[in-house]
């Protein structure tokens, strides 16, 4: 992050996928609160998948699916309005399948919010293959809402970091912390067994290697402070044999855990790796996955009113 690039990123609009499940409803309400924090509109999307179903479903059934989707969107919008009466809420009944619908609605600038589990049947959305597909392939951030709805607020956002390449997405985690008026905690897990065999002499200087990791985390924290001088930024290196286990423990004491999505260490090809899988299935708080290519200044590309078809 060079000095000329040190500008605060702008958090985009919020897109929530709804499917009629209790999990998706909770995610939509979380997304509404997030939109309020960002001072952005909330876009509710229900993917009816009628384009594909039209190949083998009769017209009356398709009409029933559309009507059920519209009723669901109205119900969720009313629940959001009851809690956040000043929030601009738009609705979209998409003909596409869920992954494509959510990706299209968010574009490159929006943040997709999904629940941790969904319904079976025609509205099978979140978080089986569809939710995982959105988290793995969306061009912008994806939040999987986990944890109890009444869990206490901890006043922190935690970013799981590794090295300087995380500066590609770390400013977005800082922006989330600033929007919440919270502290940002950088957590790096140093798993010594993950490196055995890669560097033959590393075990001869464990303390020196650990110090290098601590210095690297300090450099990351300093880079964030250069952009957010008023933000409290802490950094910590955890040593252990289970990266997912340590991060899941951290998720029990924070309001949001953020991690980058990139092929170099989180997955093979477009898929998510084991650390991301573990967090989005077992974390105690919402988990945000941010692609390393996510834009920092997203355009205002979402609709501002009405209901799509």
Image: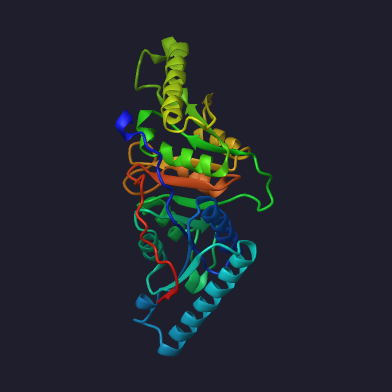
Residue pictured at 59% horizontal, 60% vertical: 29
From this viewpoint, is residue 120 visible?
A: yes
Which residue occupies the foreground of this view, 307 or 281?
307
Q: Name the spot of residue 304 as percent of width and height, x first.
A: 43, 67
Which residue sits furthest top?
Answer: 204
Q: Name the spot of residue 262 as percent of width and height, x first.
A: 35, 41
Does 105 appear above or below 38?
below
Which residue occupies the foreground of this view, 203 or 112?
112
Does 160 appear above or below 122?
above
Image quarter (top left, top right, bottom left or bottom right) of the N terminus: top left
The quarter of the displayed image where residue 54 is located: bottom left
Residue pictured at 55% horizontal, 74% vertical: 74
Horizontal placement of 80 versus 190: left or right?
A: right
Image quarter (top left, top right, bottom left or bottom right) of the C terminus: bottom left
Q: Name the spot of residue 159 as percent of width and height, x first.
A: 49, 36
Does 148 appear above or below 226?
below
From this viewpoint, is residue 2 visible?
A: no
């Amino acid at each position: 992050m060079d000095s000329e690039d040190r500008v605060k990123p702008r958090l985009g609009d919020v897109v929530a996928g709804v499917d009629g499940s209790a999990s998706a409803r909770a995610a939509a309400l979380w997304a509404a609160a997030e939109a309020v924090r960002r001072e952005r509109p909330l876009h509710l999307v229900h993917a009816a998948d009628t384009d594909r179903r039209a190949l083998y479903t009769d017209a009356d059934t398709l009409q029933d699916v559309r009507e059920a989707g519209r009723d669901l969107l109205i119900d969720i919008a009313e629940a959001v309005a009851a809690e956040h009466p000043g929030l601009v809420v738009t609705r979209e009944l998409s003909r596409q399948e869920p992954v494509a619908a959510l990706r299209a609605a968010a574009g490159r600038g929006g943040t997709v919010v999904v629940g941790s589990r969904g319904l079976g049947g025609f509205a099978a959305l979140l978080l089986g293959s569809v939710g995982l597909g959105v988290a793995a392939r969306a061009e912008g951030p994806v939040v999987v809402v986990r944890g109890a709805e009444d869990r206490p607020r901890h006043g922190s956002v935690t970013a799981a970091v590794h090295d300087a390449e995380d500066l590609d997405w770390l400013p977005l985690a800082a922006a989330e912390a600033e929007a919440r008026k919270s502290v940002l905690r950088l957590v790096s897990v140093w798993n010594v067994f993950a490196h055995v065999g890669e560097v033959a002499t590393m075990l001869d200087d464990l303390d020196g290697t650990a110090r290098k990791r601590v210095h690297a985390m300090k450099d990351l924290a300093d880079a964030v402070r250069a952009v957010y001088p008023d933000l409290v930024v802490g950094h910590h290196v955890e040593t252990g044999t289970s990266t997912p286990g340590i991060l899941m423990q951290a998720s029990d004491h924070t309001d949001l855990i953020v991690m980058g999505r990139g092929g170099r260490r989180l997955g093979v090809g477009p898929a998510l790796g084991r650390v991301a899988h573990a967090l989005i299935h077992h974390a105690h708080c919402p988990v945000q996955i941010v692609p390393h290519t996510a834009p920092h200044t997203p355009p205002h590309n979402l609709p501002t009113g009405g209901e799509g078809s």
